[in-house]
Amino acid sequence: MVSAIITNSITNGLSAFVMLFCFIGASIHLIRKRQNYTSIYIPVFFLVLLAMKLLAILVHALPDGSFTDTLWVVIALLMVFLNYLVTHSMQINSFLRILVVAISLFFCLFFIKTQNFIYMALPLGATYLLVASICKSWLRVGFLLIVLSNVIWIGARYVTEYIIGGTLPIQYRYDNDIYHFLIIIAVVMIYRSIGRYWPLDQSADKPA
């Protein structure tokens, strides 16, 4: 059986490529003013996703040390920025935006200290649930799929470690591949539908 170290690298690289493709595509649509790609937030959304992915790949490729600790801090802060970006661009009211940032910063501190992905997944999941509640059609499904991918990953990892009674060895972490594939599907789904349903005020008259 192929080690999960290899399969994780392949699916991680594939997800980064998809995010790069979506960023370039959204940027081209913005420049050419296609469909509703009139907001700079759309390509920036994909750019931040790509930056987080590339930094995460770099962290896992480098030996442990102070530099990797710095990269984890950058990743955590990008997560906070991404959550604010999405809620702001979706025109969610100011109180909820402040609440999202506060919760994200709270979990950000735990993530920096423990480097446990669950502290990234929780605020991201809560934010995307909020965003999905006001989205339309496949854009809603895309954000919900990101939430679902995190739930599946967390459930698979913790159930497995509970069964084996310890930390799952890195060579058997195939749950990461499932997570990567679900994220790829979600990002493509968001990219394909975002031109019609984001920003909301420009898509209110379009059928779901």
Image (cartoon, rainbow, N blue to C red):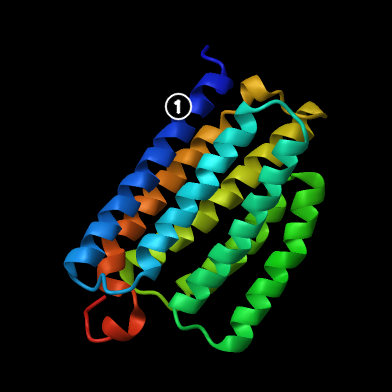
Q: Residue at x 58, y 46 (%)?
A: 152
Looking at the image, is 174 positioned above or below residue 25?
A: above
In the rendered structure, the answer to whether residue 31 lies left or right of residue 19 reads: left
Estimate how packed mark 1 is, as few (under 14), some (14 to 19) or many (20 or more) residues with alpha carbons within 10 Å.
some
User: In the depicted view, which residue is nearer to us: 70 or 8?
Assistant: 70
Q: Residue at x 44, y 33 (%)?
A: 13
> Residue 192: where, in percent of width, then height?
27, 58
In the rendered structure, the answer to whether residue 16 lies left or right of residue 112 reads: left
Identity of the residue furthest to the top in this view? 1
Q: Residue at x 82, y 29 (%)?
A: 165
> Residue 88: where, in percent of width, then height?
50, 78
User: Quadrant location of the C terminus?
Assistant: bottom left
The type of residue carrying mark 1 is Ile
Q: Secondary structure at mark 1?
A: helix
> Residue 102: where, in percent of width, then height?
71, 73
For mark 1, what is the residue? 10
Image quarter of residue 94: bottom right
Image quarter of residue 55: top right
Image quarter of residue 69: top right
